[in-house]
Amino acid sequence: MANKKYIVELSAEERKKLLELISKNGANRNKIINAQILLKADVGENGEGWTDLKIAEAFNVSVIKVERTRQRLVEKGLESALNRKAASRHKSHKLQGEEEAFLIATCCSEAPEGHARWTLRMLGDKLVEMNYVESISPETVRQTLKKMNLSLGKRKNGVFQPNQTPNSSAKWKKL
C-alpha cells in the first residue's frame, strides 16, 4: 500500500452509493465492475484494502484497469471513476474543400518534367509549395485520393500518358 500513488478512502455515503449500484440489475457491467474495484480497494475503516493484483484476479480485469480506476476516483471524483471515458479518436481532416480540389486537379494534370507520373510525396510537396497546407504526409494524400475514388494508377484519372512510339498512333500505356 505504501507504493500506491492513489489511495482509495471512501466515505460512508460513497460506500452506500456503490453498494446500491452493485445490487441493481439494470446497471452497466463496466460501472458495476468499477464499483466493485473501488469497494475492494478502499482502505478506510469499513474497506477491505485489497491489493491491485488480488482485485484484478477477482474480477478478471487487468491491474492497469484497477490502477486507473483508483486514479480517476482521486483526481476526478466518484462519477468519473464509475463511468467509462468517452472515446476521443475523431480527428478532423487536414484537407477540405479547396485543398482537395487542388489535389485532384494536380493529380489529373501532367507530371512535372522528368517524371512519368505524380507520386504521393510529390503531390504533398505541391500542396505545401502552393501554401494550401503547412505540412502533409503522403498517407494523408493517399487517403484523400482514396476517399475521392481516385488512384495514381487508374486510367480514368487522366494520369496516364499516351504512348509516344514512332510506329503507332497515340495509344494509352500503363505506367
Image (cartoon, helix red, strand yellow):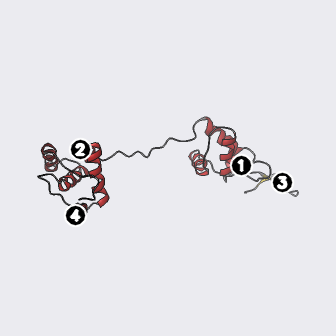
Q: CA distance from mark 2 to mark 1?
A: 59 Å
- The residue under label 4 is 54
Indicate the position of residue 121 as horizontal and vertical percent values: 66, 51
- The residue under label 3 is 164
Are discs 4 and 3 less than 8 Å apart at CB?
no
Residue at left offset 19%, top offset 60%: 50
- The residue under label 1 is 159
What amino acid is at disc 1? Val
Q: CA distance from mark 4 to mark 2?
A: 22 Å
Q: Secondary structure at mark 2?
A: helix
Are discs 2 and 1 less than 8 Å apart at CB?
no
Observer-nearest of 14 and 33: 14
Indicate the position of residue 143 as horizontal and vertical percent values: 57, 49
Q: Residue furthest right?
A: 166
Q: Secondary structure at mark 3?
A: loop
Q: Residue furthest front?
A: 2
Q: CA distance from mark 3 to mark 1?
A: 15 Å
Left-right relation of 118 to 141: right
Q: Residues within 10 Å of mark 3 (few under 14, many from 20)?
A: few
- The residue under label 2 is 78
